[in-house]
Image (spheres, grey):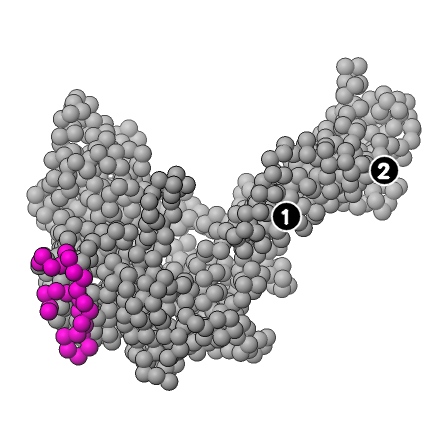
Amino acid sequence: MERAEKVGIFGRFLAATKWYGAEGYMTMVGGLIVFAIITISLLSAFYPGMAPYNPEKSVGTPFSSPSAQHLMGTDNLGRDIFSRIIYGAKVVMTVALLSFAFSAAVGIPVGLLSGFLGGKIDRVLSLIMDSIYAFPGLILAIAMAAMLGPGVINMSVAIAVVYIPTYFRMVRGQVLSVKEELYVEAARSLGAKATTILRLYVFPNVIPSVVVIFSVNIADAILTEAGLSFLGLGIDPSLPDWGYDLSRGKAYLPGGYWWIITFPGMMIALVALGFSMLGEGLNEILNPRLVER
Amino acid sequence: MAEILLRAEDLEVYYATRAGVVKAVDRVRFEMGRGETLGLVGESGCGKSTLGFSILRLVPPPGKIVGGDIIFAGENLLEKDEEEMRKIRGSRISMIFQDPMTCLDPLERIGDHIVETITTHDQGIKRAEAWKRAEEMLDRLGIDPSRLEDYPHQLSGGMRQRVMIALALILNSELVIADEPTTSLDVIVEAQILDLLKQLKEDYELTLMLITHNMGIVAELADRVAVMYAAKMVEVAEALPLYEKPMHPYTQGLLRSIPNISLTEQVLATMPGSPPDLIRPPSGCRFHPRCPYVKDECKEIEPPMREVEREHLVACHLY
Amino acid sequence: MSEKLVEVHDLFKWFPVQKSFLETLLARKLDYIRAVDGIDFEVRRGEVFGLAGESGSGKTTTGRLILRLIEPTRGGIFFDGRNVLTVNGEEMRRLRQRMQLIFQDPYASLNPRMKIGTAIGHGLEIHGIAKGQRERDLVIQMMERVGLTPAATLYEKYPHQLSGGQRQRAVIARALILHPDLIVADEPIAMADVSVRALILHLMMELKEEFDLTYLFITHDLATAKYICDRIAIMYLGKIVESGPLREVYSHPQHPYTEALLSAVPVPNPRARREHIIPKGEIPSPINPPSGCRFHPRCPYAMEICSKDEPRFAGTKDGHLVACHLRR
């Protein structure tokens, strides 16, 4: 993309937040949440000293409620929950973004080709993708995770597989409709080759719709990751992870120790929400509704 | 002119959009006599459709009627509440739209739709009688009455438009507003509908407001013509004087730029520029950036509508 | 360089009707929309040839067939003596440079994600005529020529940021920049504002002189056709019913349909209110056109032979051809 266009989109982003009322604020809030989380993740990766305590070590009395010393209290092993939240962010974001990257890297090109080429290739690919799509997401992720074993990469791949068909279908559907547009016919009448048409006329008009999936995808990936860790299928249990903490916190709720489960749960919901809002807002910007006459 | 049936004073209709406030109708005044056909003409975006909708108070949001009066048969329509308006719509004032497919319920048979219209406004009538009236109406409009059993998609474009006309007339409306009634039709069907409207004008003594950008069909149907430009009324006159002696430079330019099939030789005149932005319209006379006769006065002061010749009103500083 | 730039022989285009699975199972034969059902005509170099008709006449499909944007079911299309249907690959691409299309809907024919300047100049890149700065210069030059000014500013804009008239000029610029021989204009002014139409027509005529163009002007608007066309062909339900020099056809229409069509055109003059000749019934479906002469169910002069035999397309004089049994 030329530099001018980059500024253009950013400019429209700002304009959107200012002019587009409710959607604008939603984008901004969503954007801020996402920005905050990503910053925290990056910082905690590069500056381990950022969190007040070592998340893996027992640093206080177990089961202490939130206080000035321990902002979110401590868990059953005396570990500072606040520090665990900060470190957990890194894992959650890594898995979410990696799985998005994998799904998109496979789903989008395959969808493009399938929709554009049509015919037998399209039918075979659609059949494969529909089969995968037929599986309930979490079940499939569990199956893949169990097959692949623990680890951040493996978890990302497991979750990625679940979403590949979503990208495929969305992109393929868009390609099918864009293919029939008059401007594609115009490109053909100019004498453009199929590859040129795909690259300059189809792809740029298909991508905005992917943005919609992106945010829902990440939000969902976060929840799936939490679910996998909750079930113990995720990463190494000693590493801080929101989903895992959520699962262990469950047992202590009846005892009145609400903070162990609440904070990780809240963070999961917040980040998922943040991405959803960002995605909605981005969709509004990239596919603006027609201005009323 | 006969008794005034419809009069609008200082009508203002605005649309609040993200980009700003679009003044679609900006202090417009006009009147219609009973039994006459008024052609309301202008290009897309001039406000004529909005004007038509505002008479029935059907301006879609984010549009709103923000000022002025609309007096219909002595009553101010803008002072009525929704319930009263609903009684008026379809019965005393009805509308014919450009695209019948968007107005006819695809899941409802034509007959049922017409009957429903009748029974909604006339609680006492029996269904069988209403159906009979529908049959008579279709017959009058040149459609085989058995078509009442059909669904909209089974009819051709021309027939659907005739069904729309049937709906408009079935309750003997005093005023019919037709918004681009033939734009989506083929030439021959268009001529057919025009002939039909001419006939109905006589049979029903219709008061018809014909909203369109097509100067050809206006010439065929209208008794008087009102020209709108950029949300303002710029010229109003009887049909013949308007076409033969247009006074406003916009009307002149418009008429000279339309291909006329009856002329052997014709040179089309062109108008520079394009219709203005209605959020920030030009100062003074809205047409001044494109006017070949522009003076300083035109850029500052908005020309008032004046009766320059008998029954011929123009809003222009030239007069 | 032949005098006949485009020659069309016995051209057919039938579109199969999409049926549901069950319908296909139950039906005995496939149904076809006979969009173009056997037409012959030629377009001479340097003229404006009009192709007129109502909906379902096949005029738009014909335009696309000539440009080979769709493949004909049967028939021959010749461009400057070359058989368009036997050309392929690289040669076809080069041939495309010589025939361009101006669309009815400029907004829909412009890539919403491409800058206007890039869109206009894209043809130059495709055909290796110019790129980079040289491409940009040529584009700016053409933009100024068609009145898209200030060119440098508008170059950077996207289609949704332009007015309708500007978009149509952009489409014209895009077609013209390749210096084609033939331009197929498909209802180029139908969607433009009334006050802008004359401007676009004038522009097209000026450019025709300057660039030595030949136009195939597809329209339903007979008044505009009269203004701009030298010769005209009237189409009805996939067939050409009459063709010839425009003045001749308009002043002495030989086919009952042409007569009706001409009488139906509204005239912007209240004094000229004429009688409309309205053929009975409506345009039938192109899936099952009437036997013999397609117009016979609606024709006020129909004879017995009209429902049995299709009338041959033959000349009266001066290249004025008509397909009607009345004129035998």
Q: Among all residues in the image, which is located at the extreme front?
A: C28
As for residue C310 lying within the magenta part, the answer is: yes
* Viewer-side residue, C24 vs A30: C24
Q: Secondary structure at mark 2?
A: loop
Is residue A286 depicted above or below C47 in this figure? above
Residue in the image at 88% along x and 41% along y? A49
Chain letter of the residue beneath label 2 in the structure image: A
In the displayed structure, does residue C87 sit left or right of residue B225?
right
Residue that badge 2 annotates: A51
Q: Report which quarter residue C170 is drawn in.
A: bottom left
Residue drawn 11% across and 59% down?
C305
Rendering quarter of residue B249: bottom left
Q: Amino acid at mark 1?
A: Gly
* Left or right: where A292 falls relative to C62: right
Q: Decide if residue B24 is on the left or right side of residue C170.
A: left
Q: Chain of mark 1?
A: A
Q: Counting other residues with Cα less than 10 Å from the Cα at mark 2, is it few (<14), some (14-19), or many (20 or more)?
A: some
Q: Magenta segment range?
A: C303-328
* Relative vertical location of residue B127 with respect to residue B4 in this rendering, above or below: above
Q: Amino acid at mark 2?
A: Ala
Residue linked to disc 1: A107
Q: Which label was assigned to residue C213?
A: none
Q: For numbered disc 1, what is the local secondary structure?
A: helix
Seen from the viewer's position, the closer of residues B125 and A262 is B125
Query: Where residue B109 sits: x, y (%)?
Result: 25, 34
